[in-house]
Amino acid sequence: MKQKRKLAAKILNVSPKKVKFAPEALPDIQKAITRSDFRGLIAIGKVQRVRGSEQSRVRARHIAAQKQKGRRQGRGSAKGSKHAVVSGKEVWIHRIRVQRKLIKELRDKKLLLTKDYRMLYRKSKGGFFRNRRHIKLYLTEHHLIQKQTPGEKA
């Protein structure tokens, strides 16, 4: 019977401990020799797989519900590097485009001289400015913003 239990377990793809024979079917099971014999017995329910105690999903479901609400997403839960979500290059592209747009608008409104525009452009390209606010601060500190005359339109 031990060998028969092992054979049934292999067919059911479980441990031999999880195979259950129906008590009234023992004579049939003893006659069974081949894998196809056991497949027949499994099909009619004389040989069954026992669902033993398995790992509880309660905690997993709770965590999934929390994640659905947007919780558990902090830096401590992040897997991967600092640049896994947005690469350093993408951060740079976003930052430089914002800076270039600002200085271009100032030049077009005649608030910035062309030579100052070129100088700011190069500084931006070199990574001198952190953000828009930093450029504006630099402009006020170095008095680079041109005053408009009252009759002029921006």
Image: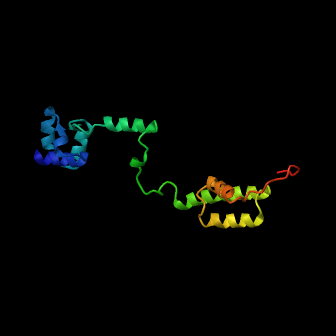
Residue 81 appears in view? yes
Q: Residue at x 32, y 34 (%)?
A: 58
The image position of residue 69, as x and y in percent, is 46, 36
Can you tell which quarter of the image residue 5 is in? Answer: top left
Instruction: Please determine whether, in this image, residue 99 is positioned above or below residue 67.
Output: below
What is the basis of the colouring in this image? rainbow
- Residue furthest right in the image: 151
Q: How many marks?
A: 0
Q: Viewer-proximal residue, 7 or 73? A: 73
Can you tell which quarter of the image residue 125 is in? Answer: bottom right
Q: Viewer-proximal residue, 26 or 109? A: 109
Q: Viewer-proximal residue, 134 or 22? A: 134
Q: Viewer-proximal residue, 139 or 15? A: 139
The image position of residue 83, as x and y in percent, is 48, 57
Residue 101 appears in view? no
Instruction: Please determine whether, in this image, residue 36 is positioned above or below residue 87.
Output: above
Decide if residue 18 is on the left or right side of residue 123: left
Q: Quadrant of the N terminus?
A: top left
- Residue furthest top in the image: 24
The image position of residue 63, as x and y in percent, is 37, 38
Instruction: Please determine whether, in this image, residue 56 is positioned above or below residue 147.
Output: above
The image position of residue 23, as x and y in percent, is 13, 33
